[in-house]
Image: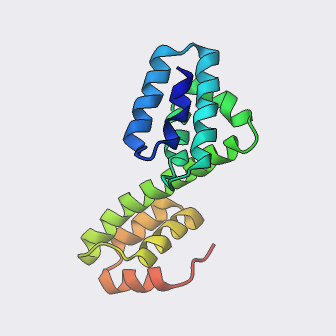
Amino acid sequence: MFWLAFAPLARDATAAAMRGIVAEIQARATGEERSELYIALLVMAAIDPWGHDLRRELVMLVDDVETEKKLLRSIPGIGDMIAEAAQLGEQKAIAELLGRLFARRVGRIPTVEEERSIVERAQAIGPVQVEDALLDLEGDALLRWLAEPVRR
């Protein structure tokens, strides 16, 4: 099973393939073996010779497994990667949900700058307050509000 740890180095490695590798490790390895294989997977993904950036995908997959989460968070650098992936996932969820509200209100999807402003405001004042603004403000007023500097 050790060979599975080298999968991120393959030229054709994909996020879908990494999901399969993690599933195989979960099914076939014991607790200690599993943790060691996850660590090796993350190290190999960090090497990233082909620019696949599979490390984030692997961190999110492994983060779903409670017993490995504790071990991985204790390893210097890995805990930071897990926290970073969680934050990115949260930002993406906020952007998707509030972006849909924006689209319904304004009649188009938000630009990159508008999406960034929505996420920043959700982090600064809370997603509920941003949701209220998206529902309460008319199109032009909403665009002006998003263009203003974020008040914390």
Side (left or right) of 62 relative to 115: right
Side (left or right) of 141 relative to 58: left
x and y percentages locating residue 38 in the rendered image: 59, 30
Side (left or right) of 73 relative to 127: right
Rendered view: 11 above or below 28: below
x and y percentages locating residue 107 in the rendered image: 23, 76
x and y percentages locating residue 70 in the rendered image: 67, 29
Rendered view: 152 above or below 141: above
Dividing the picture into quarters, in which one does residue 23 lie? top left
Dividing the picture into quarters, in which one does residue 32 lie? top right
Could you tell me which residue is drawn at 39 percent across and 37 percent down? 17
Given residues 49 and 99, the one toward you in this image is 49
Dividing the picture into quarters, in which one does residue 62 lie? top right
Rendered view: 45 above or below 49: above
- Can residue 97 be seen at all in this image of the molecule? yes
Side (left or right) of 142 relative to 84: left
* Quadrant of image for the C terminus: bottom right
Rendered view: 85 above or below 41: below
Given residues 75 and 51, the one toward you in this image is 51
- Can residue 60 be seen at all in this image of the molecule? no
Could you tell me which residue is drawn at 44 percent across and 47 percent down? 11
Could you tell me which residue is drawn at 68 percent across and 47 percent down? 80
